[in-house]
Amino acid sequence: MLSETYGIMVYQEQVMQTAQILGGYSLGGADMLRRAMGKKDADEMAQHRQIFRDGAAKNDINEAKADEVFDLMEKFAGYGFNKSHAAAYSLLAYHTAWLKVHYTAEFFCANMTVEMDDTDKLKVLFEDALKMGLTFEPPDVNRGVSRFEPISDKMIRYGLSAIKGTGQQAIEAIVAAREGRGVGPSGDVVGPFKSLFDFCVRVDRSRINKRTVEALIKAGAFDNIQLNRASLLASVDRAFEFGAAAVANANQGGLFDMGGEDDHGSSTQEPDLVDAMPWGVKERLTYEKTAVGFYLSGHLFDEVVLEVRRFAKRQIEDLIDTREPQLLAGIITDFRVINGQRGKLALFKLDDKSGVIEARADEALINAHRNLLKDDELVIVMGKQQPDRFSGGMQLTVTQIWDLDQARCRFGKFLRVAVSSELGGKAPDVARMIKEYPARREMTEQGELVRGLGVRLAVSCQGETGAASAELQLADSAKFFPSNEALAGWRVQAEHGKAAIVYE
């Protein structure tokens, strides 16, 4: 009965054969047993167990052996297939795998277009495509269309309809304007948009709204026109007003067209974009995530990875199977708080770009780190990996949490600041730095805790007979709190900007 599957029950037909041959069931009765196993009705299964025992006894199989076989049949019900389904799925899997290998770009374009409304599935496909060696051309209002498109065997153009807040109708209007099928005063203009204002004049504004344009900006779809996304976003209202004015002027032009074409040139002069400070990496990626559903042009962890890997060296994909605590760093995603058996419980994912792991933190940690435990925040954690009985995967039980500033205090040895003793060289203003960024003092159950980092001045000089160097260890009273602002202040005063934390 199990010879073709090496002694393991795989197909539903094998359960029916076993019931028929060993348990004396008719074929109809065996099918009833198969259905009962699928429903997992305890009372009905108890009845079938006795029927199977009685039938097996007639074949000289004792009760213990009959129960052993019946238990195997019950276990099978959790994963079994009928043979025709198994064959169909196997063939489909083979065809799909062949397409994925030989037409990789087309395979992912098709799948990502189908799933463009489900950002969770889209993210899985995006990351899988990267592992397969594909690259993505970012969203672009001057090149993109609604669907994902293969540009080459190794590159995919991002589908604009996959950006939240857009939709196929809006993207079709953008493509139509680009191809000279617009409805505005410049409806027959063909070619790429030259500015945000040009975009708002040429695209049918009955099919797009400000929310759509804002989503496109956040996703980076205007980057080839203007890299300052903050300035573009701040200028959306101005651009829509300009577009409306251009349409109104075009409609009234017939009354005044006795003059030359340039008589009303002042009304078509584009205004300047609103002046705005460009977003930093974190702000840019956070906005991008709201529009796309995940980080497309980078990862929040990229900004800190070089420093963090100097003390939290283990990547999530390299977690080892041990009961010992492990030090990890990553970005929090999907954060939520639930009521557990022993109080509130924080559940979240920790993502360091190499991999993602489910994590949990108890109520004490939630209360101690309210400002830190939220989506898109970098955390450094100590925790134990253990099986998750609900998902079947692994979960990290967090026991300690630090932000980057606190981790610098906890794992850093000291700050080394380069100082030159050459004529005209200037020593850092240590007193001012300590005053502006003093070590932080916290009261704990073990007493007062000082969070700060010591400073060493690395002095070098060049004389007629050669070079000399020395390190001066400043007193504990010169400890400072190593925030990003404090480190920037030290670098400004250091020789050639050389001020860095020593971790080992």
Image (spheres, rainbow, N blue to C red):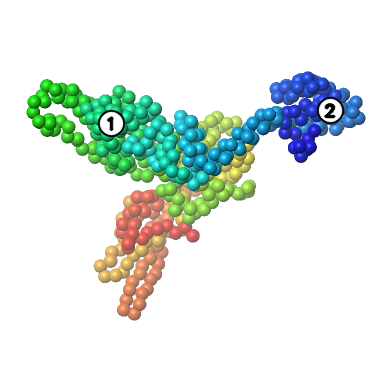
Q: Residue at x 48, y 53 (%)?
A: 309
**Residue located at (57% from left, 39% from top):** 97
Q: Percent x, y for residue 423?
A: 26, 70
Residue positioned most to the bottom: 465
Residue 379 to residue 114: above or below: below
User: How would you rate the neighbour count of disc 1 (Cα within 10 Å): few for under 14, some for 14-19, many for 20 or more?
Assistant: some
Relative image position of residue 28 (x, y in whole percent): 78, 19
Residues at circles 2 and 1 in contact by the CB criterion of under 8 Å: no
Measuring from the top left, give residue 172's x and y in whole percent: 36, 28
Q: Residues within 10 Å of mark 2 (few under 14, many from 20)?
A: some
Q: Relative to the observer, which residue lies in front, 195 or 50?
A: 195
Can see residue 366? no
Circle 2: residue type? Ile
Q: Is residue 221 left or right of residue 106?
A: left
The answer to which quarter of the image holds residue 226 is top left
Q: Secondary structure at mark 2?
A: helix
Residue 180's tag is 1
The numbered mark, 2 or 1, whose residue comes first in the sequence reads: 2
**Residue lying at 33% horizontally and 51% vertically, measured from the top left:** 436
Q: Which mark is residue 21?
A: 2
Of badges 2 and 1, nearer the viewer stands: 1
Task: Give the left or right position of residue 347, taking residue 465 as reference.
Answer: right
Q: In the rendered view, does 496 fall on the left or right side of 399?
A: left
